[in-house]
């Protein structure tokens, strides 16, 4: 699933391409991902609108249009790529997300559910194999109805992410720390990969209950979360299956992961094999030596 570094990488890739472009026409091919309004209504509303800015909060992308805000969540496998009509076909073939093509960019295929065509002939395509993505359109003045978005927790790469706010966010929580990290109302943008990486960085066992954590451990976690997210961002995101940036290229952060997806591999710090367990139905990777079950 695209997490904060992946969504931010996509945002940065799209910013210079789609901002200040006018949407001429919208094709919606899969109705399941359009949550509001009705697909036909959304397509009609988007026509003629200019994209003024793209922001990100947690794992959400927020497109600021003339009269609307378009909120896009990529779900498990959403991909947003830019199509530039001036990029001509090449003599060679390239393997792209949409198959073998003579152009590096991605043509529409059966998984391309939404296409925004701009008045300069270029396009932005949304492709989503598992169809868990969510598109919602609000009139700007009705954005206070975007409850899921407005309830998001701390934004870990923003100035507002302070130790005191982080400590406050633990209040009343009775979960295991891994489960709390996946809760978007705690810290927004952290998913399964970066939760495991942050817990390793902080030396905390993923099954520890939140109330058993010491102040020092919480402080370590406070620093670990932005650290692993920034590392992910620096490497253009983590690509295991479906994640690609706005140019349809994979990230390289999977090569720098310390624990996630490394079951049986040696811990970079102590050489103990990394283990995989299941915590709240999510595969969880950690080092038993660096992340002891009980506080030392
Ligand atoms: Zn270790």
Image (cartoon, grey):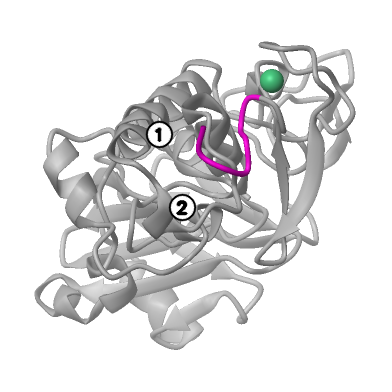
Residue 294 covered by magenta stretch: yes
Badge 1 vs badge 2, beta-carbon distance below 8 Å:
yes
Point out the quarter of the image occupied by ligand 1: top right
Q: Does residue 224 sit above or below 231 in this rendering?
A: below
Q: Main secondary structure of the magenta part?
A: loop
Residue lying farthest to the bottom in this orientation: 38
Q: Is residue 225 above or below residue 32?
A: above
Camera sees residue 15? yes
Q: Is residue 83 visible?
A: no
Decide: is 187 above or below 18.
below
Query: Observer-nearest residue: 4 or 24?
Result: 4
Q: Toward the viewer: 50 or 34? A: 34
Residue 277 included in the magenta stretch of the image: no
Give the residue displayed 36% in from the left and 50% down from the top: 58
149, above or below 94, in the image: below
Q: In the structure shown, which secondary structural element does the residue marked by tag 1 occupy?
A: helix
Q: What span is in magenta?
A: 290-296
Residue 161 x, y percent position in the rendering: 19, 39
Residue denoted by label 2: 181
Q: Check residue 225 in the rendering and tell me which mark sits there, or answer none.
A: 1
Q: Secondary structure at mark 2?
A: helix
Q: Quadrant of residue 94?
A: top right
Depth order, front residue of 274/137? 274
- Which residue is depicted at the point 33% across and 63% down? 185
Question: Going by the picture, which residue comes out furthest to the left?
Answer: 141
Specify the label residue 146 is tagged with. Answer: none
Residue located 48% across and 19% down the image: 231
Rate crowding at label 2 as few (under 14), some (14 to 19) or many (20 or more) other CA atoms within 10 Å.
many
Q: Is residue 183 left or right of residue 193?
A: left
Q: Is residue 204 left or right of residue 183?
A: right
User: Residue 17: where, in percent of width, then height?
Assistant: 39, 31
Residue 292 at x, y percent in the picture: 62, 35
């Amino acid at each position: 699933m695209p997490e904060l570094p992946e969504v931010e990488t996509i945002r940065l890739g799209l910013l210079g391409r789609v901002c200040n472009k006018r949407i001429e026409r919208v094709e919606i091919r899969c109705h399941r991902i359009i949550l509001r309004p009705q697909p036909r209504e959304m397509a009609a509303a988007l026509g003629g609108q200019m994209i003024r800015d793209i922001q990100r909060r947690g794992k959400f992308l927020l497109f600021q249009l003339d009269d609307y805000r378009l909120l896009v969540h990529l779900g498990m496998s959403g991909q947003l790529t830019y199509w530039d009509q001036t990029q001509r076909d090449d003599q060679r073939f390239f393997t792209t997300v949409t198959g073998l093509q003579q152009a590096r960019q991605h043509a529409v295929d059966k998984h391309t559910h939404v296409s925004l065509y701009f008045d300069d002939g270029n396009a932005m395509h949304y492709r989503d194999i598992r169809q868990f993505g969510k598109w919602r359109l609000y009139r700007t003045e009705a954005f206070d109805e975007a409850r899921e978005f407005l309830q998001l927790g701390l934004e870990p790469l923003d100035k507002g992410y302070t130790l005191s706010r982080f400590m406050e966010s633990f209040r009343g929580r009775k979960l295991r720390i891994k489960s709390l990290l996946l809760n978007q109302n705690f810290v927004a943008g952290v998913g399964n990969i970066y939760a495991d990486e942050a817990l390793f960085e902080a030396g905390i066992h993923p099954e520890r209950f939140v109330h058993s954590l010491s102040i020092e451990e919480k402080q370590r976690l406070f620093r670990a979360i932005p650290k692993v997210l920034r590392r992910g961002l620096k490497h253009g995101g983590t690509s295991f299956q479906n994640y690609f940036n706005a140019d349809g290229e994979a990230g390289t952060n999977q090569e720098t992961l310390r624990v996630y997806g490394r079951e049986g591999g040696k811990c970079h710090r102590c050489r103990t094999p990394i283990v995989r367990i299941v915590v709240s139905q999510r595969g969880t990777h950690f080092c038993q030596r660096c992340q002891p079950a009980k506080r030392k």
